[in-house]
Amino acid sequence: MATEQQYRDLYDRVAALRQQVAGRLGTELTVNPQLGDAVIKQLDELLESVEKSERTKPVPPDGGLAELAGLGPGAAQELGATRMPSGVEAYDETVASERVLAVGDLYYCYQHERVGVFKVVQKLQELFQSGSLRLSDGPGAFGLYKFDRRDVLRYTRQDRIAAYRRILGYGRGAGAAGSRPNTDFHMLFTHFNNQVALFWRDKRISDVIRMRAYDPSFGSIAIVRRAGLDLRNNLKFTSYGHLNVLRVEVMQLLDEAFRILGAEDVKKLFGADNAWDVVDEVLIRYFDQRLVTSPRQRMAVTGQKVLRWLAAPHILEATRAEFETLLLNIAEEAEEWITSAQSLGLAERTEAERVLPWDRHRPVGVAAGRPDPQPGNRPGYSRRGGLGTYRGSGLPVDGRSRSRTVGPRP
């Protein structure tokens, strides 16, 4: 159990050690700034190990209050002899990775639902049952039969739509009874991808301008971390419930659908080379639908990778070199997600808006005890060309381009 005097002495010694190391390595740090990161990381790890060992020590039954208040035989003679806790567990360390991974898988399923994969299989079922398809006993025909028979055991389409609304905020309506639509997800997700992409654009500039390559104004880690933590904390409160089970079932459903669409008899029927060609052909032939298959599918793949990265503890890495190395895993994915979403009018690139104010995302609906206000009634909100934007930000509330007055939901 550390006392207040030991607590004070520890941090005084650490501060003196930092100053001494910085003084001795001053010249080398100027030539090689990465050396400073390595030294600081080692000192921080030593200090963290001491703090962790202190937290594991037994705590007095009264938490040290008796000695502080001067009661009993163990009363402290001076303040320095009283118990001094080192703090509590950090808030951002408490997010469960499996829930964020589940959100990434659900986002992947949602984008395929918006492409129309399940709608295509449903249409094939209707045509198969009416005898309009020239299928009899092939693998595709048998797959359509099993797909139909298993329907009673699965979550329904309404269940999936309610989950998308509750967890991702996509779609329309209130969602499941008693739930609150996560209307902040798309805005926070777009903001995070923007900041990751902008970080690497700034990094490339700093690599060219060598004299300022280590200037913190180029590629700010803090801005990317703040955007990532905001998104992760948002998902923390929306990923409870049946998400894990539902996402596993929908992933199995998606896999089964593609096995049917990729069956030889189904491909032959539509003159297709692969399952995606069957999807496009059915959407054009029976729904007269404008295809958005490529950008939506790339949003699914890259968005899932970004959310999987966010489920790992990489976002809290403090050392610049290691943070950049880990962030490189999703650099191209974030850039591609922004590009694909921008092509559909679902997001826009931002450079001036680096930090998202806390009051831009706040509880609405059931959790806040009030209905979701209309966009025009929100404080700080104005309308431009039929879409709402926050004054001075230039960012649409729903993440869509300001130039679009109508269009699909994200």
Image (cartoon, grey):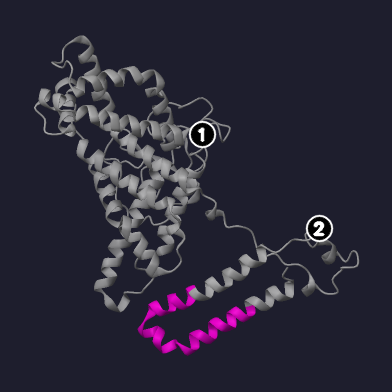
| Amino acid of disc 2 | Asp
The answer to if 410 sits in the magenta stretch is no
- In the image, residue 246 sits, relative to residue 54, either above or below, namely above
* Magenta region, main secondary structure: helix
x and y percentages locating residue 248 in the rendered image: 40, 35
Q: Looking at the rendering, in which quadrant would you find the N terminus? A: bottom right
Total residue callouts: 2
Alpha-carbon neighbours of circle 2 within 10 Å: few (<14), some, or many (≥20)?
Answer: few
Q: Kindly tell me whether residue 23 is visible in this rendering.
A: yes
Q: What residue appears at the point 56 percent right and 36 percent down from the top-left corner?
A: 368
Q: What residue appears at the point 17 percent right and 21 percent down from the top-left corner?
A: 138
Q: Residue furthest left?
A: 271
Instruction: Examine the image and state in which quarter residue 355 appears.
Output: bottom left
x and y percentages locating residue 192 in the rendered image: 38, 52
Query: Which disc, if any, is residue 241?
Result: 1
**Contact check, label 2 and label 1, Cβ < 8 Å:** no
| Stretch in magenta | 12-41
- In the image, residue 277 sits, relative to residue 72, either above or below, namely above
- In the image, residue 410 sits, relative to residue 311, either above or below, namely above
The answer to if 40 sits in the magenta stretch is yes
Residue with the mark numbered 2 = 62
Horizontal side of 80 relative to 178 (left or right) equals right
| Amino acid of disc 1 | Gly
Tag 1 secondary structure? loop
Q: What residue appears at the point 37 percent right and 40 percent down from the top-left corner?
A: 105
Residue in the foreground of this view, choosing between 66 and 388: 66
x and y percentages locating residue 362 in the rendered image: 51, 42
